[in-house]
Image (spheres, rainbow, N blue to C red):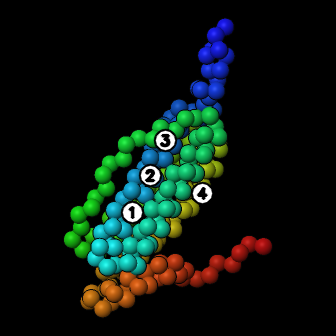
Amino acid sequence: MSDCKFYSWIIMPKSKIPQKVVEELNRQFNQELAAAHSYLALSVWCDVRNLKGFGKFFVKQAGEERMHAERILKHLTDRGVTAEVTALPAPKQEFKTLLEIAQQAQAQEHANTLGINAVYEAAVAAKDFPAQVLMHWFINEQVEEEDWSTEMVERVQAATCAGSQGDLDRHIERYLEQEVREVPDEK
Ligand SMILES: [Fe+2]
Ligand SMILES: [Fe+2]
């Protein structure tokens, strides 16, 4: 028996996830990376126009999207799947206004929600319980992501003069993180 055959299990771990769920998780893993890439592009657009508050906020979002990708990657790896890191599409970088930037963030968060839902649907259909539990976290996260991106669009729409846009830029992070009401911790 050759050494290669003996060690083949190390190279090709056996997947414990239904194929359709693997495909959806892998697609979503790359979608999260693409979202990080796009947020980086949004931050660049803002930074060169001295919209440093927005720039900083989008850099933070890029980091969060990368962490989302890492979560999916860990799940795939833990279950014996070699994730495929695909080429990413070049993100949109041409925008005329800050409103277009906010709308881009909103559109991509909505697309991400659809992507998460597709993974969850596949996991439910295949009775893959671990992937369903993983997606519960993402489904919750998308409620917040859609909330702040919609609020960002509304706040940019309301900032009609240069002064109010400057104020918005200075405080955007705080505005978007402020909860309307405090939810008490469960004890
Ligand atoms: Fe995400
Ligand atoms: Fe997101």
To which residue does mark 3 refer? 26
**Is residue 43 in view from this perspective?**
yes
Q: In the picture provided, is 19 more to the left or to the right than 79? A: left
State the separation of the CA atoms marked 4 and 2: 18 Å
Going by the numbered disc 3, the residue's amino acid type is Asn
Q: In the picture provided, is 13 more to the left or to the right than 52? A: right
Q: Earlier in the sequence, mark 4 or mark 3?
A: 3
Q: Quadrant of the C terminus?
A: bottom right
Q: Position of residue 14 (x, y in %)?
A: 62, 27
**Which residue is located at x 64 percent, y 50 percent?**
133
State the separation of the CA atoms marked 4 and 3: 17 Å
Q: Earlier in the sequence, mark 3 or mark 2?
A: 3
**Which residue is located at x 38 percent, y 82 percent?**
169
In-front residue for pair 165/109 = 165
Residue 137 circle label? 4
Instruction: State whether residue 29 is above or below residue 155.
Output: above
To which residue does mark 2 refer? 33
Q: Secondary structure at mark 1?
A: helix
Q: Nearer the viewer, mark 4 or mark 2?
A: 2
**Is residue 154 in view from this perspective?**
no
Q: Secondary structure at mark 3?
A: helix
Q: Position of residue 119 (x, y in %)?
A: 51, 46
Q: Kindly indicate the quadrant of the structure image that contains residue 166.
A: bottom left
